[in-house]
Amino acid sequence: MWHLYQFPLCPFSRKVQLALGEKKIGYELVTLYPWDADERFRQLNPAGRVPVLHDPDRRVTLMDSMAICEFLEETVDDRPLILGSARARAEVRRLVALFDESFYQDITAPLLYEKMRKRLVLRQSPDSRVLTAARRLLHEHLDYIDWLIDNRRWVAGSQLSLADFAAAAQLSVVDYLGDMDWTGHESAHGWYRVMKSRPSFAPLLRQKMDGLPPPRSYADVNA
Amino acid sequence: MWHLYQFPLCPFSRKVQLALGEKKIGYELVTLYPWDADERFRQLNPAGRVPVLHDPDRRVTLMDSMAICEFLEETVDDRPLILGSARARAEVRRLVALFDESFYQDITAPLLYEKMRKRLVLRQSPDSRVLTAARRLLHEHLDYIDWLIDNRRWVAGSQLSLADFAAAAQLSVVDYLGDMDWTGHESAHGWYRVMKSRPSFAPLLRQKMDGLPPPRSYADVNA
Ligand SMILES: N[C@@H](CCC(=O)N[C@@H](CS)C(=O)NCC(=O)O)C(=O)O
Ligand SMILES: N[C@@H](CCC(=O)N[C@@H](CS)C(=O)NCC(=O)O)C(=O)O
């Protein structure tokens, strides 16, 4: 049985959970906060990061969310998520990297630091300038998602792919933190509602971070 | 013909150049500094980053260095670099991510900012505290490479892989900037000398950044 080391608001762990859900692979969640990690976790992942997907029986330890997704893609036939020609697959991977890196660095990471780490770990209040900058960049990224959805059926092309899940994973964290603002982004909003109502999304909408409740609309698949 | 948009000290572009070299794929270099990029480059890559691998004739545009390497892996038979079982491939990808992300964030990015951007673009002098911190973290990462090389033939296992090139690409930038210190890292040093003497490395050792000459030892394959 797979064990997924993660904490509820890690967007990369969310992407992996969505992939596991789509591929109908069973797993157990193990909550791990990297900032509290002990030596035992460092032995599992020298980079000290989540997600880590670990099977103690088969002694398989996988980490880095993209390496995990590529592994699942290579070993499980159900519901391919990196699909099509080599060019189509490169487009999926480009967009996964865009959301995992640029979106995360511009928006998710600063929001998580200001609203989660400062509140739960450092006992400080958020810096409003950082929040304002992140919210401004959110609109730029949503403009780009609007453009993708206006020009293609799904984020990376004509088929649902890992790029949709990478994007939705980041957005779901922003939404949990109460910073989502869909004003002027009809296309992105319509697409996100569809993502949110997939069965693979349900576990994410139930997971809560202690001391940090999501807004009411977060788990509402029609919101 | 492929055009590789890059600048000489971008470690991700170096990784791609090494993969192209190993696979014996011809390409032309196009120098592009992301901080000077114009609207035309943004059209090519909305993320505004290098490397971008572009074929104007076939109208193929690839970006994100790992997406590029996966594409080359899927389309060119010569010299596979992500190889073996699904587990072995996951190990290659884990280590590529470790060097591309943790090593880069801890060491290469701060050194590039302090020694390249500040000097060439911002006309400021480097912050010595940042340099000291990066050099300390360099020793931790070199310890990990020592450990890998003491336990395996190559960085990711028994075969030469993209993980070796990802690691060597980052190290070569540190070396160019004059910050390499091999003291106490015999194993990593021996492995790097082998990497440096591969034919695919030769172009990297010739490329210079205007106004920022490398130390003499940089291009010496015995150093
Ligand atoms: N590229 C990695 C990024 C993982 C990552 O940054 N995880 C964060 C949590 S969201 C973490 O563990 N940070 C702790 C640290 O970097 O020390 C992946 O996709 O798995
Ligand atoms: N994950 C990307 C990272 C690329 C990257 O960070 N490139 C740097 C140069 S070394 C860049 O273009 N930075 C400009 C920017 O982020 O605006 C890749 O592997 O291609």
Image: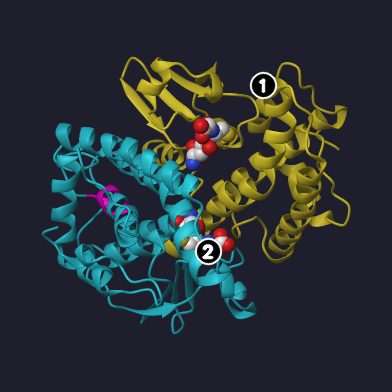
Chain colours: A cyan, B yellow
Q: What is the number of the mark on residue B69?
A: none
Q: Residue at x 37, y 29 (%)?
A: B46
Between tags 2 and 1, which lies in front? 2
Q: Nearer the viewer, residue A22 or A175?
A: A175
Q: Residue furthest left?
A: A222
User: Which of the pair A148/A69 is nearer the observer?
Assistant: A148
Identify the residue shown where x is 89% and y is 52%. B183
Q: Residue at x 59, y 58 (%)?
A: B156
Q: Amino acid at mark 1?
A: Val
- Alpha carbon distance from label 2 to label 1: 34 Å
Query: Are discs 2 and 1 less than 8 Å apart at CB?
Result: no
Image position, residue A75 (x, y; %):
32, 64
Q: Quadrant of residue B109?
A: top right
Residue in view at x 55 percent, y 46 percent: B162
In the rendered image, residue B112, in percent from the top left (x then y), is placed at 68, 34
Residue B133 shows up from this direction = yes
Q: Is residue A157 above or below residue B103?
A: above
Residue indicated by mark 2: A118
| Range of magenta residues | A161-166
